[in-house]
């Protein structure tokens, strides 16, 4: 994957999330198609979807960071609880993201 081809717009940079140790991992999915209601009309668009893996204690800090760099007034920021998964993977997240 070419760095030039896959370069993100500056406002989508989540490097700050990683640099501040707010997440263990960020997945970036380019050009996802989306449909949504906005101002009573159905909209079709292409988005960049980012999945941020972090501790529940860091979610609000991640939300605050994304809001500070995102150009939309209402960016899509959602949190989903993890009920089960690989214990080794969850341990790695705990080690990668300090709980302070």
Image: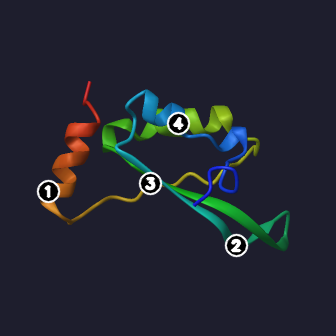
Of mark 4 and mark 3, the one earlier in the sequence is 4
Where residue 51 sits: x, y (%)? 48, 56
Which numbered circle lies on residue 15?
Answer: 4
Question: Which residue in the protein does label 1 denote?
Answer: 88
Residue depth check, mark 1 versus mark 3: number of the one nearer the observer: 1
Answer with mark 2 or mark 3, whichever residue precedes in sequence: 2
Question: Callout 4: helix, strand or loop?
Answer: helix
Q: Quick check: 49 above or below 94?
A: below
CB of mark 4 within 8 Å of CB of mark 2? no
* Residue 32 position within the rendered picture, expressed as x and y whole percent measured from the top left: 65, 70
Lateral position of residue 28 relative to residue 22, left or right: right
Tell me the CA gap for discs 1 and 2: 33 Å
Between disc 4 and disc 2, the foreground one is 4
Q: Residue at x 56, y 51 (%)?
A: 77
Verify CB contact (< 8 Å) between mark 2 and mark 3: no
> Of circles 1 and 2, which is in front?
1
Outermost top residue: 100
Q: CA distance from mark 1 to mark 3?
A: 21 Å
| Marks 1 and 2, the one that precedes in the sequence | 2
Which of the 4 quarters of the picture holds residue 11? top right
Considering depth in this image, is 81 or 69 the residue closer to the camera?
69
Sequence-wise, which precedes: disc 1 or disc 3? 3
In the rendered structure, find residue 42 and report the number of the disc placed on it: none
| Residue bearing the label numbered 2 | 34
Mark 1 is surrounded, within 10 Å at the Cα level, by few (under 14), some (14 to 19) or many (20 or more) other residues, namely few
Sequence-first disc among 1 and 4: 4
Residue 15: image location, x then y, percent: 53, 36
Q: CA distance from mark 2 to mark 3?
A: 18 Å
Instruction: Name the residue that disc number 3 marks.
Output: 79
Tell me if mark 4 has few (under 14), some (14-19) or many (20+) residues whose alpha carbon lies within 10 angstroms of its own.
Answer: few
- The quadrant of the rendering that contains the N terminus is bottom right
């Amino acid at each position: 994957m070419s760095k030039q081809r896959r370069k993100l717009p500056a406002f989508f940079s989540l490097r700050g999330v990683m640099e501040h140790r707010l997440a263990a991992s960020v997945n970036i999915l380019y050009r996802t198609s989306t449909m949504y209601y906005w101002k009573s009309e159905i909209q079709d668009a292409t988005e960049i979807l980012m999945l941020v893996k972090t501790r529940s204690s860091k979610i609000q800090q991640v939300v605050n960071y994304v809001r500070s760099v995102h150009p939309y007034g209402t960016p899509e920021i959602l949190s989903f609880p993890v009920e089960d998964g690989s214990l080794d993977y969850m341990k790695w997240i705990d080690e990668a993201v300090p709980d302070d």
